[in-house]
Amino acid sequence: MIYIFFFSLCFIHFLYDNLMNNCLLMKLRWEGGAGHIKINGTQYQLNQAHWHSPSEHTINGRRFDLEVHLVHESNDGKTAVVGIMYKIGRADFFLSMIEDDLKALAHTKGVERNIGVIDPKQVKLGSRKYYRYIGSLTVPPCTQDVVWTIVRKVRTVTREQMKLIREAVHDESETNSRPVQATNKRSIRLYRPNDPKE
């Protein structure tokens, strides 16, 4: 088995993956264990990634062009999500890798496509600095008590890559993200690489 260091908290091994268009999200699902993150002693397994446009999070009030959510789940059903935001710029390598598969699913609904082996490490973080807070899932059933980790560095994606995600969802909407939510007195903390806490 090949292990690769991913994020400062996660180890990944290669597995076969499926890409699915469920008409609301373009979702990449890993079969079996694709690695994990460990937060406050709880281990969360990586299950899937999906994209929202525009971003569902903001930094200093700014909303970005795209956001990917890497969804993890613990053995006892708790959820942790790593969010990475993108602005228009250079091509994102990971989206370039799956571009043909996205195009193939663009005119389908509820269809899964086996896309072979995808290394989750190809989803680049770009920074070890991140924000963390407790919130909810952004899609139904909007489960509460989700541990959110938002990477501080904003990555880049081309306008064409963002458009491909939007067209593949084909929900006749300009967005597939919910409005930015109020913080409701939640504590949002910025973590830096030398911070001793998780």
Image (cartoon, grey):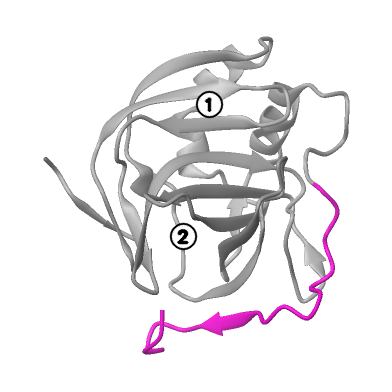
**Helix, strand or loop status at disc 1:** helix
Quadrant in which residue 33 is drawn? top left
Q: Which residue is mark 1?
A: 99
Give how far across and how far down residue 27 sits, in percent: 56, 31
- Horizontally, residue 28 falls left or right of residue 31, namely right
**Helix, strand or loop status at disc 2:** loop
Is 124 placed above or below 159 here?
below
At label 1, which amino acid type do we have? Glu
Which comes before the other along the chain, label 2 or label 1?
Answer: 1
Density class for disc 1 (Cα within 10 Å; few <14, some 14-19, many ≥20) is: some
Density class for disc 2 (Cα within 10 Å; few <14, some 14-19, many ≥20) is: many
Front residue of 162 and 184:
184
Is 187 placed above or below 19 here?
below
Give how far across and how far down residue 63 sits, in percent: 79, 61
User: Which residue does the image show at 78% across and 45% down from the upper left?
Assistant: 177
User: Which residue does the image show at 50% across and 48% down from the upper left?
Assistant: 70
Q: Which residue is mark 2?
A: 125
Furthest-left residue in view? 1
Mark 2 or 1: the one toward you: 2
Q: Magenta segment range?
A: 178-198
